[in-house]
Image: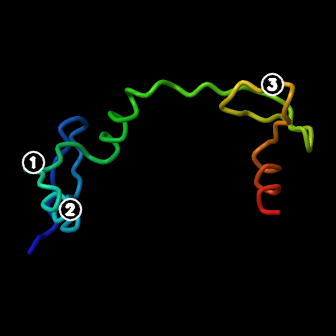
Amino acid sequence: MYQDKTLVCKDCGAEFVFTAGEQEFYAEKGFQNEPQRCKACRDAKKNAAKPARELFTTTCARCGKEAKVPFQPSNDRPVYCSECYAEMKQQ
């Protein structure tokens, strides 16, 4: 029923494929228009409105390495680097 179509991105001019599966999804959702941007440009446009995430530097309470976390660390709770946190979560 649906066949892959090659479309041209209106932002960067690159060709991209509008797959049969994507066309079926669009039809199920009731979307009338085909996509006008390639995935990279859609993602860039979506992320442009998001503010940059602020990261805070601290020291891991378990191994002592530098850790970057998306919250302001406080002295009342330990903070772990991603490796130590993953190990502790598995246990």
Between marks 3 and 2 in the image, the one whose residue lies nearer the viewer: 3
What is the spatial separation of the Cα atoms under label 1 and label 3, in whole angstroms?
A: 50 Å
* Element type where label 3 sits in the image: loop
**Relative to residue 52, is residue 44 drawn left or right?**
left
Q: Assess disc 2: are there few (<14), some (14-19) or many (≥20) residues with their C-alpha within 10 Å of its C-alpha.
A: few
Q: Earlier in the sequence, mark 2 or mark 1?
A: 2
- Please report the residue visible at 79 percent of the width from the left and 50 percent of the height from the top: 83
Q: Position of residue 37 (x, y in %)?
A: 22, 43
**Relative to residue 86, is residue 9 drawn left or right?**
left
Q: Residue furthest bottom?
A: 1
Compared with 82, 10 (above or below) is above
**Mark sitting on residue 33:** 1
**Relative to residue 49, is residue 86 drawn left or right?**
right
**Relative to residue 17, is residue 76 drawn left or right?**
right
Which is more toward the observer, 28 or 16? 28
Q: Earlier in the sequence, mark 1 or mark 3?
A: 1
Classify residue 36 by image quadrant: top left
Q: Assess disc 1: are there few (<14), some (14-19) or many (≥20) residues with their C-alpha within 10 Å of its C-alpha.
A: few
* Element type where label 2 sits in the image: helix
Q: Assess disc 3: are there few (<14), some (14-19) or many (≥20) residues with their C-alpha within 10 Å of its C-alpha.
A: few
Disc 2 target residue? 25
Classify residue 81 by image quadrant: top right
**Mark sitting on residue 74:** 3
Q: Are marks 3 and 2 in contact (CB under 8 Å)?
A: no
What is the spatial separation of the Cα atoms under label 3 and label 2, in whole angstroms?
A: 46 Å
Q: Amino acid at mark 2?
A: Phe
What is the spatial separation of the Cα atoms under label 2 and label 1, in whole angstroms?
A: 12 Å
Q: Amino acid at mark 3?
A: Ser
**Mark sitting on residue 41:** none
